[in-house]
Image (cartoon, grey):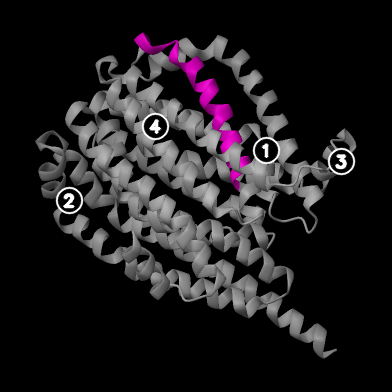
């Protein structure tokens, strides 16, 4: 772990920014190492079908969790006073509870058709377990942004480690239950991670601000852009991210979904180890710098982050691109060779996404929520169109290839739009000071 911290310090010499990244990354690395080792074990124990089913169920839960809070939790780091931040956290948790109850009513009506669509009628009842997962997901993101505001990165790191460790332990212990064991293990890991976040929030987050409905209504109006624009954008982002797995499960087979899920899961490891740590710290640093009108500092931070992420991820993604099937067959077993083939197709896309995603929060701090939603909508349209094409030619890999080509172009446009807005504001600020 010490050598990893030293390498990160050498790459990100930005004072406090580097220390915060290392703090978050250290816990994230442990969590991702646990998950990586678990993939090796679980891939040997489970076939593609159960893995695909779990991926589809959890994807549905993750998408719904983004809706129930209205994405107010993402605004927690923005207010200049702590009282508004606490009110936003309370608002998010109340909405999560109400949204989960609404989902319960809908689930009573829809759980059987959904189970049949996923070709899993034997697991109809497990959609109700997803309701628990939905609320835990919403609670995790709210507490995570709250701790992020107060720079309690150690608590975030511990939460990831506990989540990963408990989830893996339960999935291995409950192997005789097949897909049921996988689902219960995932939910159990969420409980463990939430417990650590609650412990950290109780000790480090000030709680003297009194509760008042009028305050909740006020912050709800003040930050209404988040449910109006950021929530649809986040939902479309999440649907776009999970669409390859959901599409494989709905229109091809659970086995295809399992292969895609394993391919995407392993390709996400670089983003999970480095990208997510940088994303949390970048969001906080970017917000502070923009409040101070330091647009040139934000631009320089963007370029440094993009460049270093590219060279960090180029080697592992390049190896997967050239030898994906061979690596997956050797590490996971011959039955996962198809997953390696899918990983070869997806590697360039994940390299591009790793560079873009940590700094995507700049769209929030720059107030570009509407444009962010447009980009998200274009992404989901691209993936949906590629899925339709894959169904038409009955070739799932062809649809993945089309997705990769179009989305790399969209990501480049996304980054260019951030730079354009920073330059526009910097020039406007200079004219204002000159006048």
Q: Which residue is mark 2?
A: 324
Nearer the observer: mark 2 or 4; the answer is 4
CA–CA distance between discs 1 and 3?
Answer: 17 Å
Asked whether 28 or 227 is in front, the reply is: 28
Give the mark nearest the N terminus, 2 or 4. 4
On residue 215, the disc is: 3
Mark 1 touches mark 3? (CB < 8 Å): no
Tell me which corner region of the image, top left, top right, bottom left or bottom right, holds residue 340.
Answer: top left
On residue 166, the disc is: 4
Q: Residue at x 39, y 18 (%)?
A: 117
Q: Where residue 335 sits: x, y (%)?
A: 13, 33
Mark 1 residue element: loop
Q: Is residue 176 left or right of residue 228?
A: left
Asked whether 47 or 22 is in front, the reply is: 22
CA–CA distance between discs 2 and 3?
Answer: 53 Å
Nearer the observer: mark 4 or 3; the answer is 4
């Amino acid at each position: 772990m010490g050598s990893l911290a030293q390498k990160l310090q050498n790459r990100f010499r930005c004072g406090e920014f580097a220390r915060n990244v290392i703090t978050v990354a250290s816990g994230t690395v442990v969590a991702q190492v646990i998950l990586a080792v678990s993939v090796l074990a679980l891939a040997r124990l489970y076939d593609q079908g159960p893995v695909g089913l779990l991926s589809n169920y959890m994807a549905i839960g993750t998408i719904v969790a983004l809706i129930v809070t209205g994405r107010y939790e993402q605004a927690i780091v923005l207010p200049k006073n702590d009282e508004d931040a606490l009110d936003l956290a309370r608002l998010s948790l109340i909405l999560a509870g109400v949204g989960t109850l609404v989902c319960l009513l809908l689930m009573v009506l829809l759980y059987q058709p959904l189970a049949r669509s996923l070709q899993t009628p034997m697991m109809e009842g497990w959609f109700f377990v997803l309701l628990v997962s939905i609320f835990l997901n919403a609670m995790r993101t709210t507490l995570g942004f709250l701790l992020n505001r107060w720079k309690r990165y150690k608590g975030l790191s511990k939460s990831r480690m506990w989540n990963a460790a408990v989830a893996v332990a339960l999935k291995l212990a409950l192997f005789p239950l097949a897909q049921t064991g996988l689902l219960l293990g995932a939910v159990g890991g969420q409980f463990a991670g939430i417990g650590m976040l609650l412990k950290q929030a109780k000790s480090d987050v000030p709680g003297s601000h009194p509760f008042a409905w009028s305050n909740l209504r006020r912050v709800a109006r003040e930050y209404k852009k988040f449910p109006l624009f950021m929530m649809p954008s986040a939902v479309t982002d999440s649907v776009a991210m999970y669409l390859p797995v959901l599409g494989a499960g709905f229109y091809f087979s659970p086995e295809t979904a399992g292969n895609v899920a394993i391919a995407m899961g392993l390709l996400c490891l670089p983003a999970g180890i480095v990208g997510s740590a940088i994303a949390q710290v970048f969001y906080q640093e970017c917000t502070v710098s923009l409040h101070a009108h330091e647009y040139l500092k934000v631009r320089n931070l963007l370029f440094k982050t993009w460049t270093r992420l590219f060279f960090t991820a180029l080697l592992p993604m390049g190896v997967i691109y050239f030898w994906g099937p061979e690596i997956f067959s050797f590490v996971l077993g011959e039955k996962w060779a198809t997953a390696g083939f899918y990983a070869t197709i997806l590697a360039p896309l994940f390299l591009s996404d790793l560079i873009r995603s940590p700094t995507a929060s700049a769209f929030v701090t720059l107030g570009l929520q509407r444009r962010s939603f447009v980009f998200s909508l274009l992404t989901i349209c691209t993936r949906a169109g590629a899925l339709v094409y894959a169904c038409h030619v009955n070739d799932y890999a062809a649809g993945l290839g089309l997705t990769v080509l179009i989305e790399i172009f969209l990501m480049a446009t996304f980054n260019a739009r951030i730079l354009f807005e920073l330059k526009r504001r910097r020039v406007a600020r200079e004219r204002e000071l000159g006048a």
